[in-house]
Amino acid sequence: MGLFNNIKGGLIKETGSAISGIIDKLVTTDKERLELQNEIMGVITNFASKMMDVQRDIVLAEVNGNKLQRSWRPIIMLAFGFIVIYEYFISKVFGFPPADLPTKFWDLLEIGLGGFVIGRSVEKIAGNLTSGGITINKKDK
């Protein structure tokens, strides 16, 4: 879960820095500034923690769900892969019309690939986690 802690830490740091700049413009005393920064950082940390808990619960539900729930990311990535192969290979070799992919397709593919890699990592980790801590897989013994 180190990856998610790094993401959460970066989110908290960037948001905190942005809010800190606003507080510096609005509050003149150091004591008030420090109190506001601490309070806001607490809210941000709490929100980020809850967001990570929800994401973890979603991944755990997928891992424990039916075959389609466990397989939707690979299915989507295979579809994206086919579209790319069609666009750059099949349409040119066989003279089919190009797919004419919009720019947003590549953004979606980038997000999908990132989510697929992170999601698969979490699935692998989630198989080893319990509510009380980490367990050892049978194949690790």
Image (spheres, rainbow, N blue to C red):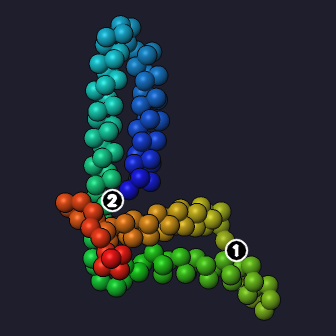
The three-letter amino acid code for the residue at tag 2 is Gln
- The residue positioned 58% from the left and 67% from the top of the image is 109
Mark 1 or 2 closer to N-term? 2
Whether residue 63 is visible here, answered yes or no, is: no
Q: Cα distance, mark 1 to mark 2?
A: 34 Å
Categorize mark 2 by other alpha carbons within 10 Å: few (<14), some (14-19), many (20+): some
Quadrant of the image occupied by residue 65: bottom left
Image position of 53 with respect to 119: above or below: above
- The residue positioned 28% from the left and 57% from the top of the image is 54
Which is more toward the observer, 26 or 118? 118
- The residue positioned 38% from the left and 70% from the top of the image is 123
Whether residue 37 is visible here, answered yes or no, is: yes
x and y, in percent, of residue 66 in the image: 29, 83
- The residue positioned 46% from the left and 63% from the top of the image is 118
Callout 1–callout 2 Cβ contact below 8 Å: no
Q: Which residue is mark 1?
A: 100
Q: Residue furthest front?
A: 141
x and y, in percent, of residue 40 in the image: 32, 29
Quadrant of the image occupied by residue 37: top left
The three-letter amino acid code for the residue at tag 1 is Asp
Quadrant position of the N terminus in the picture: bottom left
Categorize mark 1 by other alpha carbons within 10 Å: few (<14), some (14-19), many (20+): few
Secondary structure under the numbered disc 2 in the rendered image:
helix
Quadrant of the image occupied by residue 131: bottom left
Image position of 73 with respect to 17: above or below: below
Q: Which residue is mark 2?
A: 55
x and y, in percent, of residue 78 in the image: 55, 81
Q: Is residue 103 left or right of residue 34?
A: right
Which is more toward the observer, 137 or 113? 137
Secondary structure under the numbered disc 1 in the rendered image:
loop
x and y, in percent, of residue 77 in the image: 53, 76
